[in-house]
Image (spheres, rainbow, N blue to C red):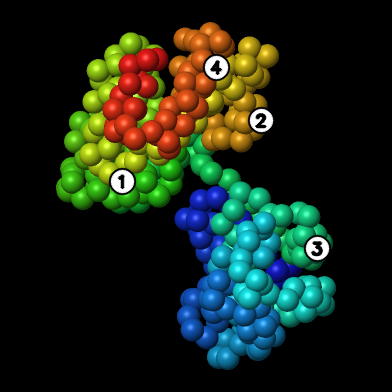
Amino acid sequence: MSYLHVVYGEVPELVDKESDQLIESYLEKEPKDDFNFVKYNLYDTELNTIMEEAMTLPFFSDKKVVLVQNSYIFTGEKVAKEKQPNLEEFIRFLENYDGQTLIVFQVNAVKLDERKKVVKLLKKYASLKKVEQFTEQEMKTWIQKELHEQFKDIKQDALDTLIGLTGIHYRIVQQELEKIVLFIGDQPTITKKDVQTIVNRSLEQNVFLLTEYIQKGQKDRAIQLMKDLIQLKEEPIKLLALITSNYRLYYQSLILSQKGYSQQQIAKTVGVHPYRVKLALQQCRKYQLHQLLEIINACAETDYKLKSSYMDKVLILELFILSL
């Protein structure tokens, strides 16, 4: 058994969940407490402290776990020069570690920096686990499982509506689910009406809706939605960046789908979640490639105006939507 583990991924909650399962499996029936579990954050802890802790025998327990959060040293993240750790001693520690304390390094990043010597050594001496984002189906299954544990159920159209409003975002779905359960009280089954009453559409899903309004020629609805989002303190520049990102994804998805790529292949090639590609494919096939390219160019021109013009930024965004 390896006692050195790295758990990494872009969803912190899922990284935590995977780490907890690993720790529980190691401790078996022994409960996690101050005698067998120590947690550090690498942003404010010296590596020497962590190494010393790992080599210290446990008290009043047969097993011991050291959890290291924010293990940025395995990524390309830049830190201030005075905070850069000396990795030579840590590298020697990795090469020679033969203790039975379980060390779990958490990395909140989609990938490790494989150019680094320390990461190459990790691949040799440690067990690496990448935690992927949920797929749409995995998210739905997780929602149903969470509800069943609370003796609740959800209708299929309500489940589809929930995902349509939140997207595949673990934290957002978790928060909205808690709100729905509180709202329905003793009611055993969540309905579509319950979801529509309680759940707010996420910013990402709102921007998808905004571009859908534009595609359908419903410019007045698109402008109203844009103004509503600005009322909620969203910045015009940020909104334009998200709109641009959508149209760029539409353009990429259309090109790749015309070449015969599947939804999963497009997601992997472009580097986005398959659910975003699913939504993009629903929209992009209603355009010609040259139309999407013209819109992307209009986005770039509008971005320049937002950053350089003295005109009202909301008006600039409104004129941009009307021009599409």
Q: Residue at x 59, y 53 (%)?
A: 109
Residue picked out by circle 3: 117
The disc labelled 2 sits on which kind of residue?
A: Thr
Residue 293, label in figure? 4
The answer to whether residue 85 is left or right of residue 205 is: right
Q: Residues within 10 Å of mark 1 (few under 14, many from 20)?
A: some
Q: Which residue is disc 1 drawn over? A: 177
Q: Quadrant of residue 302?
A: top left
Which of the two marks, 3 or 1, is nearer to us in this view? 3
Which residue position is annotated with label 2? 269
Q: Is residue 188 left or right of residue 11?
A: left
Distance between the Cα atoms at labels 4 and 2? Answer: 19 Å
Q: Tags 2 and 1 in contact by the CB under 8 Å rule?
A: no
Using the numbered discs, state the Cα–Cα distance from disc 4 to disc 1 in whole angstroms: 39 Å
Residue 24 at x, y percent in the picture:
54, 67
Q: Measuring from the top left, give residue 309's x and y in whole percent.
A: 38, 33
Label 2 Cα neighbours within 10 Å, binned few <14 / some 14-19 / many ≥20: few
